[in-house]
Image (tube, helix red, strand yellow):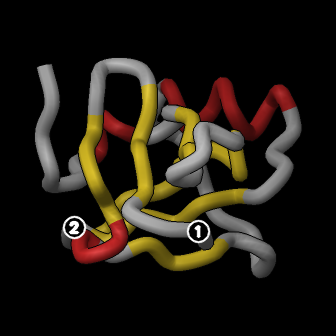
Amino acid sequence: MTKQRLTKDDEGKRVLNTDGTEIGRLVDVQDGRGYVEPDPSLTATIKAKLGWGTRSDDAHPLDEGSIEKITDDAVYLRGTL
């Protein structure tokens, strides 16, 4: 299943560039905008998957226009972050 709008359920998913390179994890979603942590710790990844995630100052904002598709396992970008 694919979709294009981020929800809290997407927290913890891998974020991939168009070439398939993993650039980080989605650690927080607020009002349809996601935040990608470039190199989250294992603890941060688990917290994000449980919906307990918080973003650091290093997290990059990700809006819907940057997203190609969202699957059960990952968020695929239209370009690079």
User: In this rendering, is residue 42 above or below 66?
Assistant: above
Amino acid beneath label 1: Thr
**Other-residue count near label 2 (Cα within 10 Å), few / some / many at <14 / 14–19 / ≥20:** few
Which is nearer the eye, 76 or 30? 76
User: Pointer 2: what residue?
Assistant: 32
Which label sits in the foreground, 1 or 2? 1
Amino acid beneath label 2: Gly
User: In this rendering, is residue 24 above or below 45?
Assistant: below
- Write the residue at 43% across / 57% down: 77
**Coordinates of residue 76 in the picture (x, y in percent):** 41, 46
Which is nearer the eye, 11 or 71? 71
**Coordinates of residue 4 in the picture (x, y in percent):** 15, 51
Q: Please give the label number shown on residue 80.
A: 1
Q: Earlier in the sequence, mark 1 or mark 2?
A: 2
**Other-residue count near label 1 (Cα within 10 Å), few / some / many at <14 / 14–19 / ≥20:** few
User: In this rendering, is residue 10 above or below 23?
Assistant: above
**Coordinates of residue 40 in the picture (x, y in percent):** 81, 45
Q: Horizontal placement of 75 versus 39: left or right?
A: left
| Element class at badge 1 | loop
Q: Horizontal placement of 49 versus 78: left or right?
A: right
| Element class at badge 2 | loop
Residue 44, by quadrant, is top right
- Write the residue at 57% across / 35% down: 14
**Coordinates of residue 3 in the picture (x, y in percent):** 12, 40
- Write the residue at 30% across / 20% down: 72
Residue 31, by quadrant, is bottom left
In contact (CB < 8 Å): disc 1 and disc 2: no
